[in-house]
Amino acid sequence: METKILSGITVANSFYNDVLSRITHLQKHELNPGLAAILVGDDPASKIYVQNKVRKFQSLGMHSKVYQLESNISENELLDIIESINKDPKFHGILVQLPLPKHIDNQKVIYAIDPKKDVDGFHPENIGLLSVGNPRFIPCTPKGIMHLIDFYQIDLSGKHMVVVGRSNIVGRPMSMLASLKSFGNTTVTLCHSGTKDLSSFTKEADILVAATGMPEYFDESFVKAGSIVIDVGITRLDPPRNDIYLVGDVNQDTVMGKVSAITPVPGGVGPMTIAMLVENTVLSAEMVLNS
Ligand code: NDP
């Protein structure tokens, strides 16, 4: 069987073409969608993630600002900065790059973000709206996966999706979203590190979403013939292997020819996550315009 490559780069570029008219419309009403990106400390990977996101905003003519903060900033100081951005009308979205230093309570920080500017979709108000089937801001990675599936006209309805990983950022919102009647309408199984005999579940999946961070763990023995594989994981190889710097959760060479479609790493889910951050920020500005 030929395995189709589901390119996130192609889908994200198509999305950027489409979103330009929405941005122009907002700008005509003197509303330039703006993102405040908060980066605490100097973790090199986090810096690259934030730079990539902000560059994309700039290339689309959108407003953005990086708040580069010292790693020893106090929790209260950080909460004060978030409060000031909450009140600043130039910003429609606030992103706090995780992880935060250990002395800062992630939950307190996420709860401090105005839910109407929570373009990452991590605030409990937004997670709650998603869980009752009335989403406002859907977390960017699951939203991007659904957008990609939609672009390639893959019909999920009635299919069995197995999600491996239950983080609040990827796995859990993915499982909620895909099970909604108005979105995926799939039957979802959510697996995690407590799951016994993991492959007995993944081998039943019509769509496997691998989001664990275990590099190249899922080989051909984990997948059903003809299934669709969404490889969310990103692990940096140090040192690189034959010029390969990044790998996913799936051992892609071994599943090629067995599965019907797969997202590559890099160039699969990653570009979609950034695209959906743009989408959520534009959506937030549109909500201001229409309020
Ligand atoms: P977390 O570490 O927060 O969550 C990992 C999940 O995988 C947990 O639920 C964990 O289970 C589960 N897990 C770990 N080991 C096993 C195992 N042996 N069997 C079954 N489940 C297991 O990671 P994230 O969700 O934040 O990210 C996952 C991966 O996706 C990472 O590689 C990350 O870099 C990547 N990522 C990629 C993005 C993109 O845009 N492409 C965006 C975000 C993340 P338990 O809950 O029991 O600990």
Image (cartoon, rainbow, N blue to C red):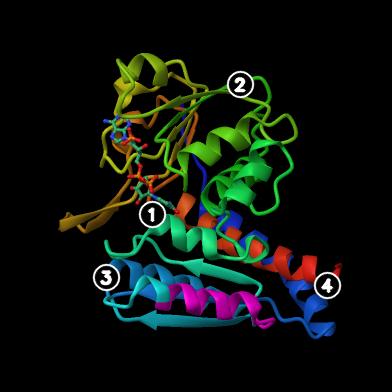
Residue 272 shown left or right of residue 90 in the figure? left
Q: CA distance from mark 3 to mark 4?
A: 36 Å
Residue plotted at (65% across, 60% down): 14
Question: Looking at the image, can residue 220 be seen?
Answer: yes
- Considering only vertical position in the picture, is 149 above or below 17? above
Q: From the image, tell me which residue sits under label 2.
A: 159
Mark 4: secondary structure:
helix
- The amino acid beneath tag 1 is Pro
Q: Nearer the viewer, residue 270 or 279?
A: 279
| Quadrant hosting residue 165 | top left
Label 2 amino acid? Lys
Taking the view exactly as shown, the residue that stands out farthest to the front is: 76
Relative image position of residue 38 (x, y in whole percent): 45, 74
Q: Which residue is mark 1?
A: 266
Asked whether 179 falls inside the magenta stretch, the response is no
Residue 198 drawn at (x, y percent): 33, 20
Q: CA distance from mark 4 to mark 2?
A: 38 Å
Q: Position of residue 254 (x, y in %)?
A: 29, 30
User: Counting residues from the N terminus, which is met first, the one under dot 1 or under dot 3?
Assistant: 3
Foreground: disc 3 or disc 2:
3
Amino acid type, mark 3: Asp
Q: Which residue is mark 4?
A: 289
Earlier residue among tags 1 and 2: 2
Q: Which residue is mark 3?
A: 43
From mark 1 to mark 2, how far is it between C-alphas?
26 Å
Q: Relative to residue 115, is residue 1 depicted above or below? A: above
